Amino acid sequence: MKLTDELYVYEWTNPFENNCNSFYIGGNVGALIDPGLRSYVPDLLKRMKNDGINEDDIRYVINTHSHPDHFDGAAYFNGRDSVSIGLNDEELAFYREIGSSMYRLFGLEAPEIDIDMVLREGDIEMGGESFRILHVPGHSPGSIALYWPSRKALFPGDVIFAQNVGRTDFPGGSGQQLKESIRTLSRLDVEYLLPGHINIVTGAESVKGNFRFVIDRIFPYI
């Protein structure tokens, strides 16, 4: 679904199967954010094709973290010279040591994926557009959020959702870190909150209200 010029949203709405929301930034950028489980990538590409996006248009695969329902699909693009696959370096170390064990919970083999784009905190450029990487641990040690300042769009992965937050009881999770990460994200100027699960949140006041709700109502239980 086209949300705005060059910004596409592919929400996962099947309540019986686990997968994540995926997003695509078009134009000269060509960035697919969180491809989801590999078995569902062909369906995702079909949905993108219906929006006029070809598989060959994808230049970057940006992974907010290494959990299977977000990262497994990156294996679909592995080995393609035309596609750069990104992950935070702390998250990659976690994946190689402990994080890959989570794949067994999904009945999957952890894929070998070549990371050729290290997503460290700071500013990056893709396709002539400026973005910011924020290191936001708590759900996993190397979780990142991608912020697109010119469009005021925030992709927080599983750090924060609509009126909820990501789990902290997985290996490498931390409730205290998650709260600090959410407070960091709440200071950004955001019109579009595009989380890894549940619904997106649009409009600056709605986004601010969502952060307030989570901080006031959810934090006491973390």
Image: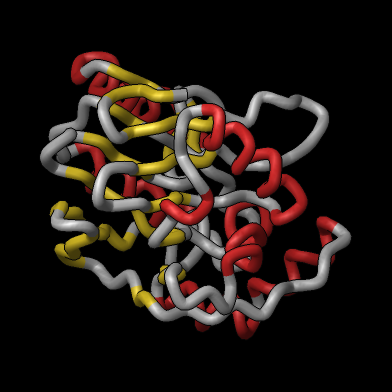
Residue at coordinates 83% horizontally, 64% vertically from top-left?
108
Residue at coordinates 54% horizontally, 60% vertically from top-left?
173
Nearest the viewer among 75 and 207 is: 75
Q: Position of residue 156 (x, y in %)?
A: 38, 45
Q: Position of residue 38 (x, y in %)?
A: 71, 56
- Residue 144 image-quadrant placement: bottom left
Residue at coordinates 66% horizontally, 49% vertically from top-left?
41
In this orientation, does residue 92 appear? yes
Nearest the viewer among 97 and 169 is: 97
Q: Position of residue 15 (x, y in %)?
A: 75, 25
Nearest the viewer among 181 and 19 is: 19
Q: Position of residue 185 (x, y in %)?
A: 25, 43
Q: Residue furthest right?
A: 107
- Residue 162 image-quadrant placement: top left
In this orientation, does residue 67 appear? no
Q: Is residue 77 above or below residue 182?
A: below
Q: Is residue 37 above or below residue 206?
A: below
